[in-house]
Image: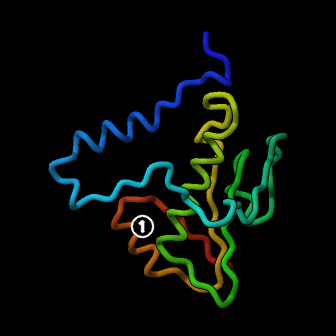
Amino acid sequence: MNTNDDKIQWHPAFDAALQIELEDEAEYLEFEPEHLLSKKPMQIDVLVKNEKDVKIKKNIGRIFRQYNIIEYKSPDDKLNIDDFYKTYGYACLYKSETGDVDQIPATELTITFVCYHYPVKMLQSSNTANHHSKTIKRK
């Protein structure tokens, strides 16, 4: 029986097997095992939890569900397609890092982008990629 100290490290073996499998094209490929995704710890700009399922009356809160991830862009910053994917990735990580499978149902998770400039290019890119978005303009 394996204890945590005796746990078999499968990833190095898989990496080696993958390189062997792809050896005919190895000169064109670069393998980066255990590639770090971020230079600094990943953090969500704002996480709003509504664990009591309270009906929120204010504009932005009407679209909220139980777990709400908000990406904020300052007046000098523009929202682009990479911001979209980064925040979408954060939402996926937040959902998956709970300890129990499907503890946070996807139906109870929202992503909201707050920016000062209408993100025309980002919306065009996300619509081209078949992502669904809803734009709420301030009156």
Q: Could you say which is closer to the camera, residue 56 or residue 95?
A: 95
Report the residue at 67% width, 65% height from top.
40
Query: What's the image's color scheme?
Result: rainbow
The answer to whether residue 66 is above or below residue 120 is above
Residue 70 position, x and y percent, is 69, 63
For this view, does 133 lie left or right of residue 62? Answer: left
Residue 81 position, x and y percent, is 47, 72
Residue that extends furthest to the left in the rendered view of this protein:
24
Locate the N terminus by quadrant.
Answer: top right
The answer to whether residue 76 is above or below residue 62 is below
Q: Where does label 1 land, which residue? A: 126
Which of the 4 image quadrants contains residue 58?
A: bottom right
Q: Amino acid at mark 1?
A: Ser
Report the residue at 65% width, 47% height from top.
94
Locate the C terminus by quadrant.
Answer: bottom right
Residue 120 position, x and y percent, is 46, 81
Residue that extends furthest to the bottom in the rendered view of this protein:
76
Which of the 4 image quadrants contains residue 6?
A: top right
Report the residue at 69% width, 36% height from top.
98
